[in-house]
């Protein structure tokens, strides 16, 4: 690794604008932000087809693409979300890429980093304590335990905390209520951090958080409780993006880590603004597939930031298409071009989603060692027939930047113009019309069915003046539809909305299509069982 001062210098940052956290990572002062008129860079968003158990490698591809850009002589930054501790010790392991395409120092990035996630969790739980104290003391007329909407968060994947009763033990322990914990990345404060344009914007959004309702149905906000200042004491340094590097020395700005379901699953607007002032190309990633992270990147993040991408990279693999074609996981290493073609409808649909926003779509075919030439040729043909700008094999995992050069050149070629972005719905459309547009245009559904409770909640939100907010759909990431068992390209079904909730501070309504777990559980063999620290201080088992 190079000293972080050298990485910053290569990007063109003034050393006075760095707040070092050791030798290899630093925060960047907001004094380094340039005005939009001075932005030199093009923004490129990396997304993917529907995830499979085999993994598609979006982060690895984004980093390999960045390293390939560097080898072509471009000044480039890769902007990523901060990894979430729960999945690191559970199913996923580290979130810093893989093989020769990684951001470093990965042990520090994955564990603690610069403390942003801990600050968000601390602020969230402080607010929970302040809300319950207000109820206990009767500080807000009409607000009792049944009206509290703000729960607690944890960094651990602990399914025992998904549903619980808190406050038991007597009159000095209350208020007694049914409660739950969410993962830190699912906190509305994390979504707010990722969408804030400035410290003042962060403060204003935090003050708008709705923590409960009175018995008369009136919302209670952080501002009403007069605790915005207390939360800002924990959050004020989190607005500064974090600078690290790839294995090949390109800068990487890692900032915020909102959940990809009940939030928008993208790194921060401030990180993109910072990078666009200094780099020729800014590579950023949206969580999950194009029907979730990318759609929200466009309809929520791009609209709020005013920073449209110049192109999108859609990550696919022959293995993934074989999975969507019905092949069993244990057989994915066996060559089967016909299964690739059968599962190709999933790729076709995701290319259609990207093209629906009027963006050039570069398909990155993430290569695995068992891929046959016939399978790779089949993926390319499916992509090009579906309207992709290009379809390029990439091998960043094995070769680093050398394996990403061809993809990098394809992205440079595709991002030469200025796309006229087409959004899924008008910003002033009614919420039900927005949901219908998403269901039909993004998820392939024919219609939407609203539960009585969801309709009632929506009417309440509209009465409060929140009907103009964008929709952040919460659904499974394992299918284009709401049903994770439906592989490939489901079409013509009815999309169910079981509930709808408001993240007023973040600035969106999130509709739920079925039950969405906001606190992961641990698998049969958690990754934690394979982790340790050597006597020299090296962390083992992160990737």
Image (tube, grey):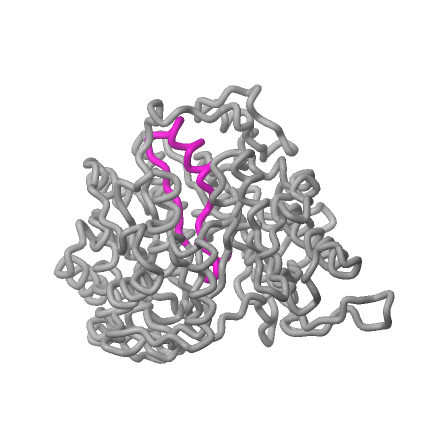
**Residue 61: image location, x then y, percent:** 37, 51
Foreground: 513 or 6? 513
Picture quadrant where residue 84 is located: bottom right
Residue 89, visible in the rendered structure:
no
Q: How many marks?
A: 0
Q: Residue at x 27, y 63 (%)?
A: 437
Residue 135, visible in the rendered structure:
yes
- 284 drawn magenta: yes
Horizontal side of residue 395 vs 111, given as left or right? left
Picture quadrant where residue 349 is located: bottom left
- 223 drawn magenta: no
**Residue 124: image location, x then y, percent:** 65, 52
Residue 435 sits above or below residue 16 on the image: below
Magenta range: 259-286
Foreground: 35 or 389? 35
Residue 228 sits above or below residue 346 on the image: above
Horizontal side of residue 383 vs 264, given as left or right? left
- Quarter of the image for the N terminus: give it: top right
**Residue 360: image location, x then y, percent:** 21, 47
Foreground: 354 or 500? 500
Foreground: 272 or 470? 470
Horizontal side of residue 317 vs 181, given as left or right? left
């Amino acid at each position: 690794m190079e000293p972080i001062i050298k990485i910053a210098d290569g990007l063109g940052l003034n050393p006075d604008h760095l707040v070092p956290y050791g030798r290899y990572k630093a925060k960047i002062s907001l004094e380094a932000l340039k005005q939009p008129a001075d932005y030199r860079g093009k923004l490129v968003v990396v997304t993917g087809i529907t995830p499979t158990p085999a993994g598609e490698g979006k982060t690895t591809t984004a980093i390999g693409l960045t390293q390939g850009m560097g080898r072509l002589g471009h000044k480039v930054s890769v902007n990523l979300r901060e990894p979430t501790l729960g999945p690191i010790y559970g199913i996923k392991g580290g979130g810093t890429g893989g093989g020769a395409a990684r951001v470093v120092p990965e042990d520090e990035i994955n564990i603690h980093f610069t403390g942003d996630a801990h600050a968000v969790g601390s602020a969230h739980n402080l607010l929970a304590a302040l809300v319950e104290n207000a109820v206990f003391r009767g500080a807000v007329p009409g607000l009792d335990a049944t009206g509290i909407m703000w729960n607690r968060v944890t960094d651990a994947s602990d399914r025992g905390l998904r549903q619980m009763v808190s406050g038991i033990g007597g009159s000095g322990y209350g208020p007694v209520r049914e409660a739950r914990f969410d993962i830190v990345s699912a906190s509305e404060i994390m979504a707010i951090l990722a969408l804030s344009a400035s410290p003042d914007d962060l403060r204003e959004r935090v003050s708008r958080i709705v923590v409960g309702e009175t018995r008369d149905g009136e919302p209670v906000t952080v501002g009403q409780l007069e605790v915005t200042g207390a939360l800002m004491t924990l959050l004020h340094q989190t607005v500064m993006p974090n600078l690290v590097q790839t294995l090949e020395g390109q800068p990487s700005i890692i900032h915020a880590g909102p959940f990809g379901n009940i939030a928008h699953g993208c790194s921060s607007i401030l990180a993109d603004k910072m990078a666009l002032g200094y780099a020729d190309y800014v590579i950023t990633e949206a969580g999950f597939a194009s029907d979730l992270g990318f759609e929200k990147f466009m309809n929520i993040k791009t609209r709020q930031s005013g920073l449209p991408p110049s192109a999108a990279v859609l990550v696919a693999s022959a293995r993934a298409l074989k999975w969507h074609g019905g092949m069993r996981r244990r057989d994915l290493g066996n060559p089967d071009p016909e299964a690739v073609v059968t599962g190709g409808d999933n790729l076709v649909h995701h290319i259609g989603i990207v093209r629906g926003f009027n963006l050039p779509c570069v398909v990155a075919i993430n290569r695995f060692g068992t891929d046959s030439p016939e399978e790779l040729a089949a993926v390319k043909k499916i992509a090009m027939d579906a309207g992709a700008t290009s379809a390029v094999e990439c091998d960043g995992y094995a070769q680093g930047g050398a394996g990403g050069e061809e993809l990098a050149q394809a992205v440079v070629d595709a991002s030469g113009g200025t796309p006229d972005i087409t959004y899924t719905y008008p910003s002033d459309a009614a919420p039900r019309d927005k949901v219908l547009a998403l269901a039909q245009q993004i998820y392939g559904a024919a219609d939407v069915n609203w539960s009585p409770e969801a309709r009632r909640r929506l009417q309440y939100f509209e009465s409060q003046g929140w009907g103009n907010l964008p929709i952040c759909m919460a659904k499974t990431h394992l299918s284009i539809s709401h049903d994770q068992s439906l592989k490939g390209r489901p079409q013509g079904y009815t999309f169910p909305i079981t509930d709808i909730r408001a993240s007023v501070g973040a600035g969106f309504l999130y509709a739920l299509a079925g039950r969405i777990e906001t606190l992961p559980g641990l698998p049969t063999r958690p990754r934690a069982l394979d982790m340790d620290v050597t006597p020299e201080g090296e962390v083992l088992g992160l990737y």
